[in-house]
Every structure is written in C-alpha cells, then in structure tokens.
Amino acid sequence: MIVIAVLLMSTGLMFLVYPRSVTDASYRRNADRLATSRWVGGSLILMSCLFLIMGTMQLLDETKHHIGH
C-alpha cells in the first residue's frame, strides 16, 4: 500500500515540477498544457493522500474489532 502511494505521489510531483515539454506549440497550447499538467499532478497527490488515510482507517478498524482476512 505504501509503495503504491509513493509511486502515485512521485508521479504527481513529476507532473507538478516538470510540466513543460520542449515543443514548437503556441503560447496558448503551452498554457493549456501547463494547467492540465498541474491539475493531473495535484489530483494524483490528493488521491494518494486519501488512499493512505483510508488504508490507515481500515487498519485501525480491523485492529479495533479483531477482524482479519
């Protein structure tokens, strides 16, 4: 679970840190690509944080009720 969250966070950080690619596109297309890249990166980071929170809540619930699979 932690490995998947780390992979999602690192991918999200790459979208946030390196959003620009070297192309011969117009300013408008570059601005759209930058906004989309930031949105995707932020979404990946937020999803991985929620994934860790839900996993922690599930583990705490299992230990509290002594339920295991």
Image (cartoon, grey):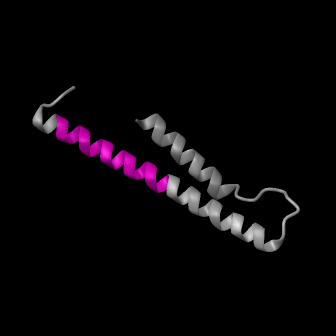
Residue at image point 53% right, 40% down: 7
What residue is rendered at 57% in x and 56% in y?
A: 41
Q: Quadrant of residue 19?
A: bottom right
On screen, residue 60 versus residue 66, left or right, reads right
Magenta-colored stretch includes residue 47: yes
54 is higher (above) or lower (below) than 34: above
| Above or below 28: residue 44 | above
Residue 3 among those drawn in magenta = no
Q: Tell me which segment is drawn in magenta.
A: 45-62
The single residue placed furthest to the right in the displayed view is: 24
Dominant secondary structure of the residues highlighted in magenta in the image: helix
Q: Is residue 4 left or right of residue 37?
A: left
Q: Is residue 16 above or below residue 51?
A: below
**Where residue 53 sits in the image (x, y, percent)?**
33, 49
Task: Tell me residue 25's x, y (percent).
Answer: 84, 65
Q: Nearer the viewer, residue 39 or 57?
A: 39
| Residue drawn at the location 51% of the way across and 58% of the way down | 43
